[in-house]
Structures are given as structure tokens and as C-alpha cells.
Image (cartoon, helix red, strand yellow):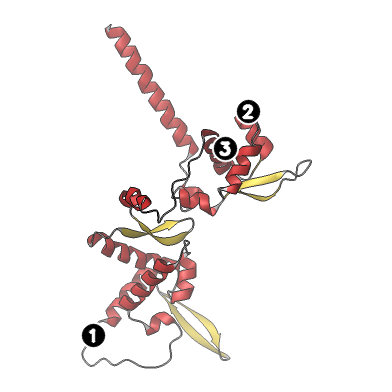
């Protein structure tokens, strides 16, 4: 636990800071009824200090149920009076534990840099049949290839994309931008100052990624491909020697 100060009405006020997990446990313990305890009734500096932990959990759940887009833990912390984003994530862990225990059809997931309540994957097919959720976007092999290059090499210019793929990318880029998977993020400093392209938040949401850092490491993919090819060669060699 550490202390800092801030100015309040011209005076220095001591602010006690706790680790998020310790803060959450203390809030739960302080809220349990004790003999002889009386609430102070004085004004609070944070919304969290005026709420029971269980009430704050329900409020967090309510906010996540009504938002249509992922909302960052930092934004939620400021909105609901949590001490910091880590404390929000600690509360999310507790909520998800309750959902898992009760076998709920949904969980709170971290996606596209934020938090959102999502239904579990096993219900996707049935939910699509209701027509209440968007159908899957089908991407051609050329679009997937271009999208993968941009994801791993962003920001990237069109000339680099075409050099890697060996074909023109005008139409593919247009479709990816139209579907909000890719956007223009600036201009390169090379001759002609061509556009730079990068992936969008929609890309992260559709592919279930919290951030670009969650992409599978390219070297690991190459290593896996090499191991598979080696196993195939060894199997073919063994079969040939047996015959």
C-alpha cells in the first residue's frame, strides 16, 4: 500500500492506494455487517465508496449489457468509481466465475481493446438462425491473404502488398476498406507519398483478438508448418521402405 497527496480546496489530502485485488477484498469485507458498526453518512470522493461491492458488480454488469461496442477497462474504472482498470478486470473475473458456475450462455470477454458481454461460441449457429445477429462475412482467399499481410506488416503501402502477392490489390483493398477490416492510416514519406494501410477495430472483433499483439507469432507458424512437412516426409519414407 502506498500514499500520495492531491490538492482539495487549497489543502493537501492524503490518498491511500491499494493493489486492485486487495482493494476488492477489502470492499467485500467492509460491506459485511458487523455488530456496533454504523455508516458514517459523510460525502464520498468516489462512487465506489458509496456502493456495496455487490451493487457495484451489478452496475458493471448492467453497463456491459447495454453497450454495443467493447468498452475499455480504463473508461469503466472512471465511470463506475473503480480505483484503476486492473480492479475492473478483477471484478470481471468474479462475474465470469458466477456465470460459469451457473452455466450462463454468456461471458464477459476482452476483445478489440475493451470488454463486452458475448454469448458463448457453441450457441453461434442457433443465434444466426434467428436472424438477430449478423451472418458471417465470407472473405475470398485473396482478401484473406491481403488481410494477413497487412495485419503482420502494418502500416503497409499498396506497392509492398502487390510485391508480396505478385498481383494487383486495388479491388481487394477497396473491398476490405468497404467491410471496415482495413483503413487508411496516413501517408508514407517515399516518393509520391502513397497511402499507408492498417487493420481496424472491426478486424480485431471479428477475429476475436484483444489487440494486434495477440496475433499468432509468424515464426511459430513457420515452425509448425516445417514440423508438419517433416512428419509427412518421414511417413512417406517409412512407407516406401516397408514396401
* Cα gap from disc 1 to disc 2, whole angstroms: 70 Å
Q: Residues within 10 Å of mark 3 (few under 14, many from 20)?
A: many
Circle 2 — which element?
loop
Mark 1 and mark 2 lie on one chain; the one further toward the N terminus is 1
Q: Looking at the image, which residue sits at the far right?
A: 191
- 166 horizontally vs 227: left or right: right
Residue denoted by label 3: 146
Tell me the element at label 3: helix
Residue 164 sits in quarter:
top right
Q: Earlier in the sequence, mark 2 or mark 3?
A: 3
Which residue of the protein is positioned furthest toward the top in this rendering?
243
Q: Which residue is mark 2?
A: 166
Is 9 situated above or below 106? below
Vertical order, 144 against 83 (above or below): above
Q: Which of pointers 3 and 1 indicates the residue nearer the eye?
A: 3
Circles 2 and 3, Cβ within 8 Å, touching? The answer is no
- Residue drawn 68% across the image and 36% down it: 159
Expressed as whole percent of the image width and height from the top left, the position of residue 236 reads 34, 14
Horizontal relation, residue 25 to residue 16: left or right? left
Q: Position of residue 6 (x, y in %)?
A: 54, 83
Q: CA distance from mark 2 to mark 3?
A: 11 Å
**How far from the left and from the top, in percent, is residue 185?**
65, 51
Q: Which residue, as the protein is rendered here, is positioned at the far left?
A: 35
Name the residue carrying label 1.
Answer: 33
Instruction: Classify mark 1: residues with Cα within 10 Å, few (<14), some (14-19) or many (20+).
Output: few
* Location of residue 119 by image quarter: bottom left
Local packing at callout 2 (Cα closer than 10 Å; few below 14, some 14-19, many 20+) is few
Count of numbered badges drawn on the protein = 3
Q: Secondary structure at mark 1?
A: loop
Residue at 46%, 81% (x, y): give it. 15
Amino acid at each position: 500500500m502506498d500514499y500520495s497527496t492531491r490538492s482539495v480546496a487549497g489543502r493537501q489530502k492524503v490518498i491511500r492506494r491499494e493493489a486492485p485485488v486487495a482493494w476488492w477484498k477489502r470492499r467485500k469485507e467492509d460491506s459485511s455487517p458487523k455488530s456496533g458498526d454504523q455508516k458514517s453518512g459523510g460525502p464520498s470522493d468516489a462512487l465506489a465508496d458509496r456502493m456495496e461491492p455487490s451493487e457495484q458488480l451489478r452496475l458493471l454488469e448492467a453497463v456491459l449489457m447495454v453497450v454495443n461496442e467493447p468498452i475499455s477497462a480504463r473508461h469503466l474504472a472512471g465511470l463506475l468509481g473503480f480505483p484503476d482498470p486492473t480492479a475492473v478486470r478483477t471484478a470481471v473475473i468474479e462475474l465470469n466465475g458466477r456465470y460459469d458456475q451457473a452455466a450462463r450462455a454468456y461471458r464477459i470477454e476482452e476483445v478489440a481493446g475493451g470488454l463486452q458481454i458475448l454469448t458463448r461460441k457453441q450457441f453461434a449457429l442457433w443465434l444466426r438462425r434467428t436472424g438477430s445477429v449478423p451472418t458471417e462475412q465470407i472473405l475470398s482467399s485473396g482478401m484473406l491473404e491481403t488481410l494477413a499481410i497487412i495485419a503482420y506488416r502494418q502500416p503497409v503501402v499498396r506497392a509492398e502488398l502487390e510485391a508480396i502477392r505478385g498481383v494487383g490489390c486495388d479491388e481487394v483493398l477497396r473491398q476490405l476498406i468497404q467491410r471496415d477490416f482495413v483503413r487508411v492510416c496516413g501517408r508514407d514519406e517515399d516518393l509520391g507519398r502513397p497511402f499507408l494501410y492498417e487493420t481496424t477495430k472491426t478486424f480485431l472483433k471479428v477475429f476475436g483478438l484483444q489487440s494486434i499483439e495477440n496475433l499468432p507469432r509468424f515464426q511459430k507458424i513457420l515452425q509448425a508448418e516445417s514440423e508438419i512437412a517433416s512428419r509427412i516426409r518421414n511417413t512417406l519414407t517409412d512407407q516406401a521402405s516397408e514396401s
